[in-house]
Amino acid sequence: MTPAEFEARYQEQVRDILTRLQSAMATSSQLEASMVEIGESVQRLSREVEQFLLAQRSSQPNPPS
């Protein structure tokens, strides 16, 4: 293998690695955004359940003591 061939092979592999890294970073960013969205959905659902339970409790008559 000549020095020029070695350099061309090296540059091709570096480009491939950088492309894969860029793809992984994009995937990571998408995953992070999805996790934030899921977390917000869980918080909203939790608030709705809490409000529902409070409404149920306040609409029920108090049991006699």
Image: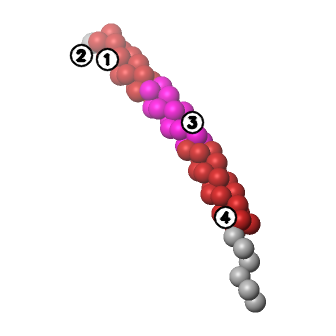
| Rendered image coloring scheme | secondary structure
Label 2 vs label 4, nearer the camera? 4
Asked which quadrant contains residue 13, the reply is top left
Task: Tell me what residue is drawn at x 64 percent, y 48 percent.
Answer: 44
Asked where in the image residue 55 lies, by quadrant, the reply is: bottom right
Task: In the displayed orientation, state which residue is furthest to the left.
Answer: 1
Q: Spatial distance from mark 2 to mark 4, Cα to Cα?
A: 79 Å
On the image, the x and y values in percent for residue 30 come to: 51, 33
Amino acid on which disc 3 is placed: Ala
- Residue at (33%, 10%) from the top-left corner? 4
What percent of the width, then of the height, locates residue 52? 65, 58
Which circle's residue, 2 or 1, is located before the other in the chain? Answer: 2
> Which residue bears the numbered disc 2?
1
Asked whether disc 2 touches disc 1, contact meaning CB atoms under 8 Å apart, the reply is yes
Q: Residue 31 at x, y = what percent? A: 50, 38
Is 29 one of the magenta-colored residues?
Answer: yes
Q: Are marks 3 and 2 in contact (CB under 8 Å)?
A: no
Q: Quadrant of the N terminus?
A: top left
Task: Please give the residue where the numbered disc 3 appears in the rendered image.
Answer: 33
Residue type, mark 2 in image = Met
| Label 3 to label 2: alpha-carbon separation | 46 Å
Task: Please report the residue visible at 41 percent of the width from the left and 27 percent of the height from the top.
Answer: 20
**CA separation in Å, label 4 and label 3:** 35 Å
Alpha carbons under labels 3 and 1: distance apart: 36 Å
Q: Which label is found at residue 9?
A: 1
* Label 1 neighbour load within 10 Å: few <14, some 14-19, many 20+: few
* Direction from residue 12 to residue 51 in the image, left or right: right
Q: Nearer the viewer, residue 8 or 64?
A: 64
Say whether disc 4 or disc 1 marks the residue closer to the N-terminus.
Answer: 1
> Residue 56, labelled with which disc?
4
Which residue type carries mark 1? Arg
Residue 26 located left or right of residue 54: left
